[in-house]
Image (spheres, grey):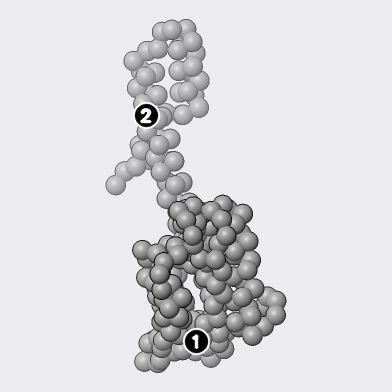
Amino acid sequence: MTTAVERATVDPAAALAAAHTELHAGQPSLNTLAELAQVTEILLAQVGLLADQLTEARLCPLTGLPTRALWLAQAEEVVATGPSVLIMIDLNGFKPLNDCFGHAAGDAVLTEVGARAGEWARGRGCAGRLGGDEFVLAVREEPGLDQAITALRRRLIAPISHDSRRLTVGAALGVARVYGQTPRALSRALHRADLRMYRDKGKTGRR
């Protein structure tokens, strides 16, 4: 399919300069107006292409989940709606599994964990992948949320089938309620959730 960019027969800069001159003189020609229409089509096509590229860059190519920047924007929307909770997730035993069975097995685990986290968050809020084997969720407060988070942990560590193997990893979770409805409140809750995740993992500080 031929795009507007491929159909370009005018120099956008030259066309805009000519149009500026003629419009300033108050006598734009039909040819100039036609070129302006073509330049507009070219620019709109380029904007659309850049928008698609930006969207792809903000999604994890492996899990399809938002990466940090897009997730933060979505989480701010969740937090702005009212009381909410953040959940940080780090997989236990992922590196040994990846080293033992290979990157394809590791990718399979990340893909499935991302799918499970995303499905659990659907209707509650949003899920994202921060990188490596770390995931994060922002969800609205709801009755029975603590029990739902316990079920989430069980779901994340359920065996994953790959290449005739049953792969298993653990999951450390850090849960923090967001006190406020602002980006700053979200940032503070992220910090608390991160610390609690590492406490759950049995470590101090980041790897």
Which residue in the structure is indicated by mark 2?
A: 38
Residue drawn at x 45%, y 23% is 15
Is there CB contact under 8 Å for labels 2 and 1? no
- Residue 156 in view here: no
Q: Position of residue 79 (x, y in %)?
A: 50, 56
Q: Is residue 93 above or below residue 121?
A: below
Q: Which residue extends farthest front? A: 143
Quadrant hosting residue 133? bottom right
Q: Secondary structure at mark 2?
A: helix
Which of 75/29 is in front?
75
* Residue 69: image location, x then y, percent: 54, 56
Q: Give the residue at the far left of this rendering.
A: 1
**What is the secondary structure assignment of the residue under circle 1?**
loop
Amino acid type of the residue that numbered disc 2 sits on in the rendered structure: Gln
Q: Nearer the viewer, residue 26 or 156?
A: 156
Q: Is residue 106 above or below residue 72?
A: below
Residue that appears at 45% across and 18% down: 19
User: Residue at position x 49%, y 10% from top?
Assistant: 24
